[in-house]
Amino acid sequence: MSIDSIFPKPKDWSTFEDIVCDVFARRLNNPNLQRYSVSGQKQSEVDIAGLTQDGVLGIQCKHHPAGKIAASEIDNEVAK
């Protein structure tokens, strides 16, 4: 079942990352996910992290308003 929702644009990047963290925590039924660091800290290109049954999950948030992202950008982020 697919549910489409429209949300207002977050006021800042930190709020966006909080939303992404909450969405993934609920989607994966995993309360262990949390923001990895705060703005300005070294974060090894990870914004959200947590333990799962399969190991450690890391999520990097990116701003792509047109909804398009190149496979090469994803590969570069994973390599970091």
Image (cartoon, rainbow, N blue to C red):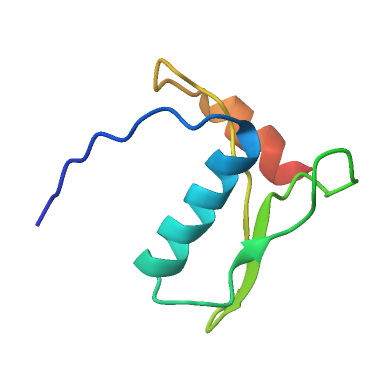
Question: As drawn, is 21 to the left or to the right of 73?
Answer: left
Residue 65, placed above or below residue 11:
above
* Outermost top residue: 66
Asked if one can make out residue 56 in the rendered structure from this viewpoint, the answer is no
Q: Which quadrant of the figure has residue 24?
A: bottom left
Q: Residue at x 40, y 15 (%)?
A: 66
Which image quadrant for residue 8? top left
At which x and y percent is residue 22? 47, 59
Q: Residue furthest front?
A: 11
Q: Judge from the rendering whether residue 11 lies leftward or rightward of residue 51; answer left or right.
A: left
Q: Is residue 37 placed above or below 80 in the rendered structure? A: below
User: Residue at position x 56%, y 51% from top?
Assistant: 18
Residue 28 position, x and y percent, is 40, 70
Q: Position of residue 55 (x, y in %)?
A: 62, 78
Q: Residue at x 51, y 77 (%)?
A: 31
Q: Residue 60, percent across and down?
A: 63, 45
Q: Quadrant of the C terminus?
A: top right
